[in-house]
Image: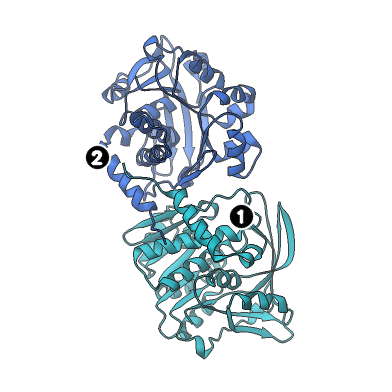
Chain colours: A cyan, B blue
Amino acid sequence: MNLLVVGTVAYDSVRTPFGKKDKALGGSATYFSMAASFFTDVALLAVVGEDFEEEDRRLLEERDIDLRGMTAVPGGRTFRWDGEYGYDLNDAKTLKTDLNVLAEFDPVVPEALKDVPYLFLANIDPKAQAKVLDQVRHPKVVAADTMNYWITHCRKDLQDLLPRVHILLINEAEIRQLTAEFNLLRAAQKILTWGPKMIIIKRGEYGVLKITGDAVFAAPAYPLEAVFDPTGAGDTFAGGFMGHLAATGSLEPEALRQAIVMGSVMASFDVEDFSLGRLAQLERAEIDKRYHAFRRLTEFSDL
Amino acid sequence: MNLLVVGTVAYDSVRTPFGKKDKALGGSATYFSMAASFFTDVALLAVVGEDFEEEDRRLLEERDIDLRGMTAVPGGRTFRWDGEYGYDLNDAKTLKTDLNVLAEFDPVVPEALKDVPYLFLANIDPKAQAKVLDQVRHPKVVAADTMNYWITHCRKDLQDLLPRVHILLINEAEIRQLTAEFNLLRAAQKILTWGPKMIIIKRGEYGVLKITGDAVFAAPAYPLEAVFDPTGAGDTFAGGFMGHLAATGSLEPEALRQAIVMGSVMASFDVEDFSLGRLAQLERAEIDKRYHAFRRLTEFSDL
């Protein structure tokens, strides 16, 4: 196995100005693994309830996602998130969160997955993220996401985790909260002194910034005429990014830049439909085509 | 003369979290012409009061900006703008506007400037923009800026102007207001049916989108560790953009993309100091160096 993600599998109820969908398959590990599956073999570590639908399991299996780490709790109910977006699709408003089986999630990495080289710790309790990291023997690349809740309530755990993480994915508001620095470059430089070698700042419809000790790379979001549902865009980005990295095996600057763009490409597909609708229908040729369109979107010649 | 800008020359009082400056030279035509002067010969059409300082005139003359169109009204007072920025430097809060001589501004293009091929109509009353356009005989490229005030109060005048404009520069909030479309691509497509051939959407620290009938180009803003004062960034962008276009004489897609980046480069210098502080000290070699850094900021290789 090349890539492992620990995170959530959820049922989402999402309302946007363009429609609504109830009990839609979602969750960070779901979006991540769907996206990554186009590039490499990927396994998912998560917990679901007895209510987890067979057809949803099949959707993941059809993409060859390894589900040996997906535990179904007898009598349990799958994590639920109800959210809403206005016209400004950058900001999700959480209406309700039912942790259900997630409240007792104690991630155990199956023996067969403990030698995975690429590891993504999606946005869950940093104590659970650390626990997964403890079980993976020699990860080559560890990337992690987080959110405002953990920064506010579990800062110490998060600070303890960061020296063990190579790549931190974080959005603009979160990096400002975490570092108490408004300027994004200075905020990133501060985190680089805490251990991570690379910070990826997610800016929603404005794209991403990748910041390392010696360089900054900026990628826009792919402009679309219709964005239906931004749910999962960040995790889909992460799945494309890590999937491409794991597939190439390279950590050279050029491979990292390509991976950033591949993440952006995958996120641009995700938002074109509700839930996993677009990713489930996606063909590899479409991905390559949009990657090339991304080049044309951003390229300009020397003077 | 290759390039003419009509707009304001102002005295600004600006407060940011990093300091304050009173009676600082500002105004759209000032920032624009300073930026453009690094690339081509540029003339300025504007009105000032009797209080306009000799040293400020000298600053413009030292950059070889043609001031034959800058009228000083005897007994008049120069336009004044008092503004404030919080840590989120994207949003200026206007504290006070004193139109002064600008209230009676009736732009008359000097005979010697009527054959100018490149014309920039900075953000002033669309009736005054149209009046300047009436006087320029055969402009090759006409670009215009506007703002929410004119969209709200002079929409008819602005709509009448647009079919005569090749390139519209506008920010995100303004294009949404003007078109009643939230999606930026659809908003731009709508304006393209009104006459302009190209829309440049300014997104502050997130960069710009250039939209034509068949292509989109996205450029980020150059990330800086210290932004002191964003005043004039949009006009400085426009000056770099139009200055580069006027210098190359080309309207090919590649030249337009280069010009967008050159505008972004100039804007990135503008914000590094209050007022025109940085632009007044700038050397051409620094511009070229940052253009190359911009390429490295955004480039990524094919798969």
x, y percent for residue B228: 38, 42
Image quarter where the N terminus of chain B lies is top left
Residue A221 drawn above or below residue B92? below
* Host chain of mark 1: A
Q: What's the residue type where badge 2 is placed?
A: Ala
Along the line of sight, the residue nearer the viewer: B148 or A283: A283
* Host chain of mark 2: B
Task: Mark yes or no: residue A172 visible.
Answer: no
Image quarter where the C terminus of chain B lies is bottom left
Badges 2 and 1, same chain: no
Task: Mark yes or no: residue A61 visible.
Answer: yes
Q: What's the residue type where badge 1 is placed?
A: Asp
Query: In the shown orientation, is residue B284 left or right of residue B269?
Result: left
Along the line of sight, the residue nearer the viewer: B69 or A103: B69
- Seen at 47% across and 76% down, the residue is A119
Q: Secondary structure at mark 2?
A: helix
- Seen at 36% across and 12% down, the residue is B112
Classed neighbour count for the residue bearing mark 2: other residues with Cα under 10 Å, few (<14), some (14–19), many (≥20): few
Q: Quadrant of residue A260?
A: bottom left
Along the line of sight, the residue nearer the viewer: B294 or B97: B294
Classed neighbour count for the residue bearing mark 1: other residues with Cα under 10 Å, few (<14), some (14–19), many (≥20): few
- Seen at 38% across and 62% down, the residue is A190
Q: Secondary structure at mark 1?
A: loop
Tell me the residue that label 2 is attached to: B285
- Seen at 42% across and 37% down, the residue is B256
Residue A180 drawn above or below residue B202? below
Tell me the residue that label 1 is attached to: A91
